[in-house]
Every structure is written in structure tokens, then in C-alpha cells.
Image (cartoon, rainbow, N blue to C red):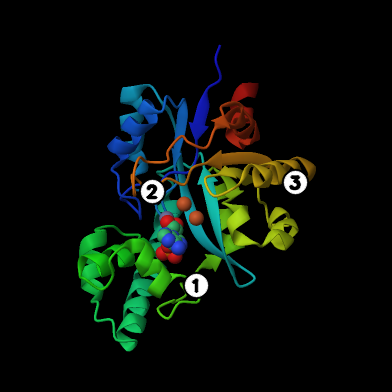
């Protein structure tokens, strides 16, 4: 049998992606993917629709999220996989994460106003139309209302860390994020470590219950993937991967372009407590 591939890091318009769950499923089908996970920022709202759309195409679906957490003052994106999307605590707690995002948009707009950029928070919310607004929505609003020519320019001039509009967001403690994912039956994975530069904190994360590292990512060069795969094996962690596709962007969507072999998903399933107990019955 030929090799099957998966993509375990995808966004829709339920956070800062620009595609619907149905469009994502269609693109996954076009890329001949065997399985995908939805990992919208701080929400699981799109998972039900994504699951239904995947059934249509015969694609295996893993419900997930990407929680914004804080570890020792660093922002750390924590991926959760195989979540029970009806878990009450997960539904309740993610609304708190979403409140942090909404508050951050207000703070960010205030900061922009203080440097002479007259954007209104409502212009961001009207465009975002979701419960997990983020900087990409602010960037799109800046373009729509004529403050910038492109979203890239919006990030460079105003929104990237260190730029005059930069505003931090309050993030939940990393340990809370781990616990929230675990109590919902999921496994917790450190997202895009190559972008975070906090490798020195990985031993602390493992002690707090981290299950895996996202080794494949669209912004990881091959050497970075190799380095993290070796690190994961050494620490007894899972290796996972995905594109972090947010939609078509400037051209074709990048879904499926990071070639993650299906066997990775088998490893993840072996780590799941409820799967192993089911197998004993
Ligand atoms: P937030 O979670 O609101 O801080 O926004 C983070 C998101 O912004 C990331 O998931 C990326 O999708 C996007 N992003 C971060 N930095 C940039 C950048 N320099 N240019 C374009 N998009 C970016
Ligand atoms: Zn994003
Ligand atoms: Fe991220
Ligand atoms: Fe992401």
C-alpha cells in the first residue's frame, strides 16, 4: 500500500483561519489526506461541522484545539488532540480563553489609537465574526479600513512583537491547559517549538504532563524537524505534525504540504488512555 499522509494543525473561520470547516475538508480531500485534525485557537466550536464534512470525504477526523498558554512568562501554544467535544469543563473553560482574546483586541485597538491609528474595536469584531478573535483579524481590519495596504504590512508596522501596536494577551497557565486537555480525554502537544525558542522549558513541560512535540510544521526546516524528532524520542514524547494552514492566503492553501506519515497517528492512539482500556475489553 502507498504511504498515507495526515495534517494535524489546521484553522478555520471559527478562529483566525479564513476557510469554513467544509472547505478545509474539501482541500484535505484534494490533497489526498487520510486524516486531519482541527486545531482552532482556544475553541472547539468548528469540530462538529469538520467531523461531518470529513465523513462525506471518507477522511478520518481528530477533534482538537490550540490553547494559548503561559509558561514562565512565555506564550506557549498547546495543541490538544482526541478531545471529547461535549466535555463540559472544556466548553466552559475555553470561553475564558476566548474572553482573554476579546479583551486583548480592545487593548490592542486602544494601543493603536494612542499612536494615531483610528481603528475601532467593532470594526475588528464585525470582520472576525467569531469568539476567538486574534491579531490576524486586526490586520485584516487595518487593511479593510485603509490603514495598511496588506496584512503583512499590518504585522510588520504595528502588530508583531516589538512593533508600536504590540499588545500582550493574558494567557492561562500552561499547567491548567494540560489539565484541561487531559480531563477531556485528550493528549497535549507543544506547538511549533522551532518558532518559540523555549526549548529550555521542555523538561518542565514534561514534568507537567506534556505528551508530545509538533516536529513537522510549515515553518520548520527539515533540520528542525529532525532535531525535535530526536528530542521527542529521547524524552519518551510523541512526534506530531501539521501545516498550521489558515486558508488560501496569497495562493494555494498549505494544507497537506507538510508530509506527516499516517503512522504518527497510530502512535498517538496508543498513548490514549481510553483506547488502551477499550482494547483490553
Ligand atoms: P494571536 O494569537 O492573536 O497573537 O495571533 C497569532 C496568529 O497571528 C498566528 O497564529 C499567526 O496566524 C498570525 N501571525 C503571527 N505573526 C504573524 C506575522 N508576522 N505575519 C502574519 N501573520 C502572523
Ligand atoms: Zn492562527
Ligand atoms: Fe500557534
Ligand atoms: Fe496554529
Does the Cβ of the disc 2 residue fall within 8 Å of ligand 1? yes
In the picture of the structure, the residue carrying the numbered disc 3 is 231
Compared across the picture, whether 91 is left or right of 177 comes to left
Determine which residue is flagged by label 2: 246
Residue contact at pointers 1 and 3, CB within 8 angstroms? no
In this rendering, position of residue 187 left or right of residue 44: right
Kindly indicate the quadrant of the structure image that contains residue 69: bottom right
> Distance of mark 1 from mark 3, alpha carbons?
28 Å
Label 3, residues with CA under 10 Å away: few <14, some 14-19, many ≥20:
some
Residue plotted at (61% across, 34% down): 268
Question: Is residue 80 among what the camera can see?
Answer: yes
Q: Which residue is mark 1?
A: 161
Tag 3's secondary structure?
A: helix
Sooner in the amino-acid sequence: mark 2 or mark 3: 3
User: Where does residue 170 sit, x and y in percent of width and height?
Assistant: 48, 72
Quarter holding the C terminus is top right
Name the one closer to the observer, 111 or 276.
Answer: 111
Secondary structure under the numbered disc 1 in the rendered image: loop
Assign a secondary structure to mark 2.
loop
Given contact means CB atoms under 8 Å apart, are the residues at marks 1 and 2 in contact? Answer: no
The residue drawn where x is 65% and y is 40% is 239
Amino acid at each position: 500500500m502507498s504511504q498515507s499522509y495526515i495534517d494535524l494543525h489546521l484553522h478555520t473561520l471559527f478562529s483566525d483561519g479564513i476557510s469554513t470547516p467544509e472547505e478545509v475538508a474539501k482541500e484535505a480531500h484534494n490533497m489526498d489526506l487520510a486524516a486531519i485534525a482541527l486545531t482552532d485557537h482556544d475553541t472547539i466550536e468548528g469540530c462538529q461541522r469538520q467531523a461531518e464534512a470529513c465523513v462525506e470525504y471518507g477522511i478520518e477526523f481528530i477533534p482538537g484545539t490550540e490553547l494559548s498558554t503561559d509558561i514562565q512568562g512565555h506564550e506557549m501554544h498547546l495543541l490538544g488532540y482526541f478531545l471529547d467535544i461535549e466535555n463540559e469543563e472544556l466548553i466552559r473553560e475555553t470561553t475564558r480563553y476566548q474572553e482573554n482574546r476579546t479583551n486583548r483586541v480592545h487593548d490592542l485597538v486602544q494601543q493603536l489609537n494612542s499612536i494615531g491609528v483610528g481603528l475601532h474595536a467593532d470594526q475588528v469584531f464585525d470582520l472576525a465574526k467569531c469568539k476567538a478573535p486574534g491579531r490576524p483579524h486586526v490586520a485584516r481590519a487595518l487593511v479593510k479600513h485603509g490603514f495598511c495596504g496588506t496584512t503583512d504590512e499590518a504585522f510588520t508596522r504595528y502588530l508583531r512583537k516589538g512593533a508600536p501596536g504590540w499588545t500582550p494577551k493574558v494567557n492561562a497557565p500552561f499547567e491548567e491547559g494540560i489539565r484541561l486537555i487531559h480531563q477531556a480525554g485528550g493528549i497535549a502537544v507543544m506547538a511549533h517549538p522551532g518558532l518559540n525558542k523555549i526549548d529550555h522549558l521542555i523538561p518542565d513541560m514534561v514534568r507537567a504532563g506534556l505528551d508530545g512535540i509538533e516536529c513537522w510544521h510549515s515553518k520548520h526546516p527539515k533540520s528542525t524537524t529532525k532535531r525535535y524528532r530526536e528530542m521527542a524520542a529521547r524524552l519518551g514524547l510523541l512526534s506530531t505534525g501539521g501545516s498550521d494552514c489558515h486558508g488560501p492566503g496569497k495562493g494555494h492553501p498549505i494544507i497537506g504540504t507538510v508530509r506527516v506519515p499516517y503512522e504518527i497517528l497510530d502512535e498517538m492512539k496508543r498513548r490514549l488512555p481510553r483506547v488502551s482500556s477499550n482494547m483490553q475489553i
